[in-house]
Image (cartoon, grey):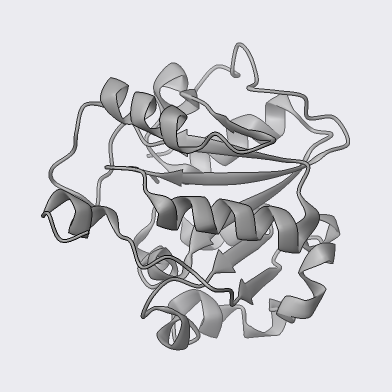
Amino acid sequence: MNERVSSPLPPKLPGPSDGLSIGLIGGSFDPPHAGHVHVIRTAQTRIGLDWVWAIPARGNPLKKTQTPFAKRMDLAREMFTGPRTRVTPLEQDLGLTYTVDVIAALQRRAPGARFVWIMGADSLQSFHRWRNWRQIAQMVPIAVISRPGAFPSAGLSRLAKTYSASRIPQGEAGALAYLKPPAWTLIKAPHAPHSSTAIREGRG
């Protein structure tokens, strides 16, 4: 996810939004796995989110090969079945590619929502390669959830260095949705050692 283009507002949101704290998690989900579920559930419980909207990427500029979008949507819907979690084809419906544009469209459509961007610590390590990553950090609070092998080095990421003064302790994650960005936290929690790459290669 991450060309800034002119786009219409989403015709329909995936759920209620006004006055609610909503976690947004994007990715190729190729395929979705227990590690993604771990990230979603940890964010829900530690931040106290009302909803999580999972947004499969219609295409990922940082990855060369992908399963067709429709198949990834179906797999995500089968995997992300937890309470107050919805899988939405917003990127496809809007014709967008980049996270910064998806967030902007959602904020225009749902100004009363408190959006939080959720990502695994493995994604944080490449976050500075996303289109307008600094703008994303200025648009929404960010919750980073530990992933196998990624937690220690995540603190050395470009985001961590650039916004070190905006980091809040993980023990205060419950306030994240109410903070004005930039604001982010790094949450450590037990996790399942899954990755989409390993699963595709038959190693997971």
| Quadrant hosting residue 17 | top right
Q: Is residue 22 left or right of residue 58?
A: right
Q: Work out whether residue 66 can be spotted.
A: yes
| Quadrant hosting residue 21 | top right
Tell me the quarter of the image containing the C terminus.
bottom left
User: How many labels were placed on the picture?
Assistant: 0
Q: Position of residue 179 (x, y in %)?
A: 82, 62
Q: Position of residue 112 (x, y in %)?
A: 84, 34
Q: Residue at x 61, y 75 (%)?
A: 186
Q: Nearer the viewer, residue 31 or 20?
A: 31
Q: Residue at x 39, y 75 (%)?
A: 148
Q: Position of residue 141 (x, y in %)?
A: 69, 59
Q: Position of residue 103 (x, y in %)?
A: 58, 40
Residue 92's place in the image compared with 139, above or below, is above
Name the outermost residue toward the top: 11
Q: Residue at x 66, y 73 (%)?
A: 185
Residue 179's place in the image compared with 100, above or below, is below
| Quadrant hosting residue 177 | bottom right
Q: Work out whether residue 168 can be spotted.
A: no
Q: Is residue 143 left or right of residue 7?
A: right
Q: Nearer the viewer, residue 34 or 184?
A: 34
Tell me the quarter of the image containing the N terminus.
top left
Residue 154's place in the image compared with 191, above or below, is below
Name the outermost residue toward the right: 19
